[in-house]
Image (cartoon, rainbow, N blue to C red):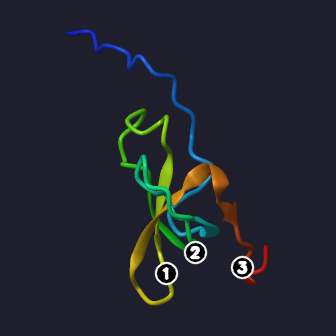
Amino acid sequence: MARRAQHPLETQPAPFAVGDSVRGPEALPPGDRRTPETHEGEVVQVGSGWDGVDSADTYLWVRLPNRTERKLSMPHCARLPPDGRP
């Protein structure tokens, strides 16, 4: 049986899960100097979906109430309780 190489980066479980309600700032591309807008919505994807791939630049894909999606900066997001207040 072939040995499977271990991934070089240590990974930890994300603090959010699909279906969580969150509030946080938009994750802007490097070099973008705009002020990130703050959005609230439901998590539909955590990062890229691949362990360790985006560990230095973690993000969430969030579906907004108008059914569009935004990429939010995970370290700056907060989970909202079911009543929608922080």
Disc 2 packing (10 Å; few <14; some 14–19; many ≥20): some
> Mark 1 falls on what kind of element?
loop
Helix, strand or loop under label 3: loop
- Name the residue carrying label 1: 64
Residue located farthest toward the left when viewing the structure as drawn: 1
Query: 10 Å neighbourhood of mark 1: few (<14), some, or many (≥20)?
Result: some
Numbered label attached to residue 85? none
Q: Quadrant of residue 12?
A: top right
| Of residues 1 and 60, the one drawn nearer to the viewer in this rendering | 60
Q: Nearer the viewer, residue 4 or 60?
A: 60
Q: Earlier in the sequence, mark 2 or mark 1?
A: 2
Q: Which percent across, then down, holds residue 71?
A: 44, 63
Where residue 24 sits: x, y (%)?
62, 65
Q: Label 2: which residue?
A: 39
Q: CA distance from mark 2 to mark 3?
A: 16 Å
Q: Secondary structure at mark 2?
A: strand
The C terminus: image quadrant = bottom right
- Judged from this view, the residue extending furthest toward the front is 33
Residue drawn 56% across the image and 71% down it: 37
Q: Looking at the image, is 11 positioned above or below residue 72?
A: above
Task: State the residue position of label 3.
Answer: 82
Between the C-alphas of marks 2 and 1, the distance is: 7 Å
User: Does residue 11 appear left or right of residue 67 in this picture?
Assistant: right
Q: Amino acid at mark 2?
A: His
Residue lying at 57% horizontally and 40% vertically, measured from the top left: 13
